Amino acid sequence: MTLEEKTGKNYISHSAMSTWLNCGWSFYLTRIQKIQENPSYWLVGGKSLHEGTEIYDALEPGAAFDSRAVFEQRWAENYKLADNGMPFRAGGKKTTAYPNKEDARWWLDNGPKMLDFWVQFRETSGYTIYELPDGAKAVETELNTEVGGVSMKGFLDRLMVSPEGELIVVDIKTSSKAPVTYTQLGTYAILTEKTMGIRPVKGAYWMARTGELTEPVELDHYTENRLATHVKGFKIAVDNNIFIPQPGFMCGTCSVNHACYAVKGKNSHLYPELGETDE
Ligand code: SF4
């Protein structure tokens, strides 16, 4: 079977590759077997924050904006969509104020503050949103292109212009720590260059919990040739059923641990072993 027949998608995304790199078995269970996943508060919160920032960025300058009302409205909608009857996963640590870790109450307390931080960042940082050739703002821009003969798709949170006039790839993160690598930003810089013919020189993460942008870093070393090697390797792995479990610290919050044999998930016997099917 081809990648498209296995995953239902005829393209590769950064998120698919990073899921596979973190744990091949999680990729197999979620993207190929498509088994039901435990929802999480952090995905509902992250989606609601992203949508809130998009709503803000679509407004005319100076228009009224109520961060709490917008976040709560997006949260209610996204929570309903995510609720599949399975228990929600909470991130973070237990605290006196939040003994159930970062649950719905934590997100409804903190999500609006994150959205307020975005408003402040937009109003005071000097960073502006790049305007695309058709006059639209570069917000959640869909990037479709081919790399190494393989179709790739990405959604770029923001393409921004720094106060110094540099073009910067910005990804919004609600995690407490910024990613240790810039691979995602480098990948988007390549996809932007191939799609739009302009190369962002730097990339940074906007950290929603603090409202701060990480120091923008140069992305020159992320080249199309290097990305092509990785994408082609990933495709070979999927085509050849290379899905190796990576049991470790992530298993506790993994959305499919109930179905994973590597951690003796209670439902793991329901899913075929590789080799039992033609997948
Ligand atoms: S429980 Fe651990 S080993 Fe199993 S799929 Fe999830 S991350 Fe991978």
Image: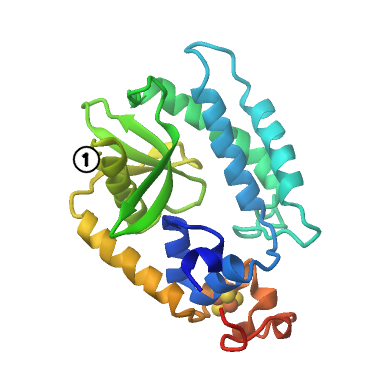
User: Is residue 255 visible in this depiction of the protein?
Assistant: yes
- Residue 223 rendering spot, x and y as whole percentages: 21, 54
Residue at 54 percent of width and 69 percent of height: 6
Q: Residue furthest top?
A: 62
Question: In the rendered view, would you say 133 is above or below 88?
Answer: above
Mark 1 — residue? 201
Residue at 62 percent of width and 83 percent of height: 263
- Colour scheme: rainbow
Residue at 31 percent of width and 66 percent of height: 230
Task: Residue 195: name its quadrant.
Answer: top left
- Residue 141 rendering spot, x and y as whole percentages: 43, 36
Three-letter residue code for mark 1: Val
Could you tell whether 169 is left or right of 217 in the image?
Answer: right
Could you tell whether 225 is left or right of 94 in the image?
Answer: left
Task: Residue 25: name its quadrant.
Answer: bottom right
Residue sitting nearer the eye, 46 or 30: 30
Question: In the rendered view, would you say 217 is above or below 6?
Answer: above
The crowd level at tag 1 (other Cα within 10 Å; few <14, some 14-19, many 20+) is some
